[in-house]
Image (spheres, rainbow, N blue to C red):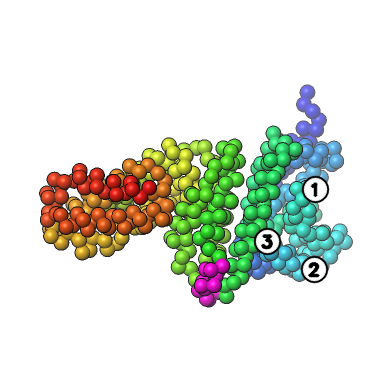
Amino acid sequence: MKLEMFDIIDRSINLFQENQEEYLIITREIKYTLLNMLDSEIHTGITTRIKTEMSLREKIIRNRYYLTFDSPRAIIDNMHDLIGLKIDVRFIEDEFKAYKQLKEFFNVQLEDGYYINDHHKNLALDMGSFQPQTQKNGYTIYRIDGYFLNGTHKVRFELQIKSLVNSFWSDIEHKLVYKNHTFRVADGMIKDMLSSIKANLVIIDRQLQIIYDSFDGENQITSSFNSRFSFEELISKAINDLCLQKLQTSIGFGVDIRGTSAILGHYIFEKDLMDYSNKDQILSLLGIFKRIQDDDMDFENALVVHPPKRAKDAFSKAISNFFIEVMNKDFEWYVFFKILFAVEPGNNDQDFALFVKVFHDSIIEKDCYEQRFKSCSQSDATLVIRDLELMLAQALIQVETIQIVHNERIKKIQETYNNFLNSVDKRIINYIDFEVNKENYQKELSDSVAQLF
């Protein structure tokens, strides 16, 4: 016979399912009210969620609501986080600023101790509660209970205010500790690791806050800023700290990804941020961090990528095929592309095509053929250039190291290729002349490139 407690649990779940449309409407209305009330300079958006059936069932059992309340309606009406909303802010200091605005807006106290605004009397927040609250882990959080009066019954919700780094860290902790029933609370190593992550994220938050505040909105990055902060290094450190824990959580052990993080930090800075002249640079970087936070980053499943459709040159085609072949065989390459796809905004194919283009343009200068191979006909010069670029790709592939995408190596590869072009240009007058010695040219270029590593 089925236990009696499961009868009230099942009926509570049924009531919850019947009211889904109501919860969606209320969630949208609360979000709309908060967005109009908050200063857009402080928040970056509001995230919402409605409890899942599994989460609701688990909470009813864990908190023994089936004993505390005598009806499904009482259980649902007293579920304080049936709806969850999170005000996303950029920095830790902005959490207090957002909370202060809530205090100023919800300023009329009700008999039950909650506060409303005269123009929004059906929306109440417990602004009298002490904030920020101290959690079991010792860290603080802005977490405010509220309810929406819908007719005669209250739909309760929980409102949190979190900076980007606090959101990221709490997601890690939630998955690693609270949702992992095999985790041992006494496991000091895990607790120390979480504390270290938290400390690093707080440092990153503070660095970004200082940089952001140092901009006046119009001025370009000054030399004093560059001497005080290495923005590129900050990006690299942030990628390393944010992704390392996701990697450890996924595969169960740590891997040194500092080199990969440095490559990606430089790549992102050169491609997206170098030309920014004001706070947009920081906001773009925060967007990158947000994408990392939202990506589950499973480091065990194979990456699915297709060769760029628009790649017409021999170099891009050859190097694309190499990257695709190696990314699921060599873990170092796998981690590199996994993180690249996480930090970039497009799908894998779009991100991959853009990376290949940037890599090509970094090594093969736009005008490097302009004054070369003038002794050849135009058609012969085109064939020579095609073969030379394919030789360069093959030379890089033969090195068999991820260092080919390191910034300092790229500059040396570019110089080596330009010197090689000068040498070949002096020795040929047509494509036939070039083709006769093609194997020798390939060996010459491959040897020169190999000496760089």
Seen from the viewer's position, the closer of residues 168 and 51 is: 168
Q: Is residue 137 magenta?
A: no
User: In the drawing, what numbered circle is on residue 78?
Assistant: 1
Q: Is residue 220 magenta?
A: yes
Question: Which residues are drawn in magenta?
Answer: 217-228
Between label 1 and label 3, give the one nearer the viewer: 3
Task: Report whether 16 appears left or right of 209.
Answer: right
The numbered mark, 1 or 2, whose residue comes first in the sequence reads 1
User: In the drawing, what numbered circle is on residue 107?
Assistant: 2
User: In the drawing, what numbered circle is on residue 220?
Assistant: none
User: Do we see residue 46 in this rendering?
Assistant: no
User: In the drawing, what numbered circle is on residue 92?
Assistant: 3
Q: Residue at 72%, 64% (x, y): give it.
A: 96
Seen from the viewer's position, the closer of residues 268 and 70 is: 268
Query: What amino acid is at disc 3?
Result: Ile
Does 218 sit above or below residue 152? below
User: Do we see residue 252 in this rendering?
Assistant: yes
Seen from the viewer's position, the closer of residues 120 and 207 is: 207
